Image (cartoon, rainbow, N blue to C red):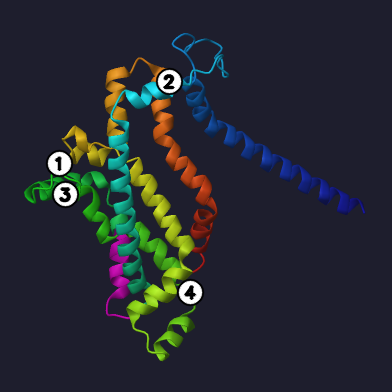
Amino acid sequence: MNTYSSVKTSLFIHRIMVYSLLIAGSVLFILPLLWMLSTSLKGDVGLFDLPPKWVPEPFQWDNYVKAVQSFPFLRYTYNTLFLTFVSMFGTVLSSSLVAYAFAKLRWPGRNVWFVILLATMMLPPQVTMIPVFVLFKKLNWIDTYLPLTVPYFFGGAFYIFLLRQFFMTIPKELSEAAKIDGCKEIMIYAKIFLPLSKPALATLAIFTFMGTWNDFLGPLIYLNDPDKFTLALGLRSFQMQYGTRWNVMMAASIIVMLPTIVLFLSCQKYFIEGITLTGIKG
């Protein structure tokens, strides 16, 4: 009985320690966001008070109105949404096709090419930045959305790896039964594998959405016309003009950040499920 009680006590203490560390880590990560939210609701006075006042009185909601009116918010939002959804479509389409070929089709050198594909993940993007820029310049794609969308239609190594791992968990008996019924490979991919891969595809879409929505370097390199700027570039321009108005700056940052937070919170079930299931089979 004493042994059982001691084991139960040890498990309880261990659980308390784990939960305490998780809560401490959560607070550490959420504090900057809370500080941004608090600053965005403050007036021009009291921004740098020590100790900081976390709950402003009164709430200055007009900071958000000023932030939206200070730069072409609707135009930049449209540009960003256009790039984001085109990139999501291209990534899901191309990566799923290539992943299906690596996971289920038999062809010479398949494993060798897959290793080469994985090796490209170790290549820093800074190494290819200048050659890729020169290529796009020779194609007369500078100051267009083509450099920011077309590469997504050629797949990404990480996304292909992610989907390939998920496809390998789908029983081969399903595709064999479909072949017996006369289905071609493209129909097996479209009618069987894609519907069964919704968690992995959702994970892919979330990754692409967050990456494209928050992308600053790509638009900075390839876009010159202010009418084509994205929200990330617009936020930078806003910072250069109104950098000293931290309350309005934080309000603009919250507005730009909000879609990614909402997307993750609403789709975290599929995101976690997709990440978990892609690691089941190698």
| Residue depicted at 36% across the width and 72% down the height | 100
Q: Is residue 282 visible?
A: no
Residue that carries the numbered disc 3 in the rendered image: 132
| Residue depicted at 40% across the width and 67% down the height | 164
| Residue depicted at 42% across the width and 69% down the height | 194
Q: Secondary structure at mark 1?
A: loop
| Residue depicted at 16% across the width and 35% down the height | 225
Cα distance between the residues tagged 4 and 1: 43 Å
Residue that carries the numbered disc 4 in the rendered image: 170
Q: Is residue 185 visible?
A: yes
Cα distance between the residues tagged 2 and 3: 40 Å
Disc 4 versus disc 1: nearer the observer: 1
* Amino acid identity at mark 4: Ile
Disc 2 versus disc 3: nearer the observer: 2
Cα distance between the residues tagged 2 and 4: 51 Å
Between 112 and 31, the one lying in front of the other is: 31
Cα distance between the residues tagged 3 and 1: 14 Å
Q: Which quadrant, please, contains the N terminus? A: bottom right
Mark number, residue 3: none
Specify start and end residues of the magenta stretch as a single range. 106-119
Q: Is residue 210 left or right of residue 1?
A: left
Residue that carries the numbered disc 1 in the rendered image: 143
Mark number, residue 63: 2
Compare marks 3 and 1 and give the one earlier in the sequence. Answer: 3
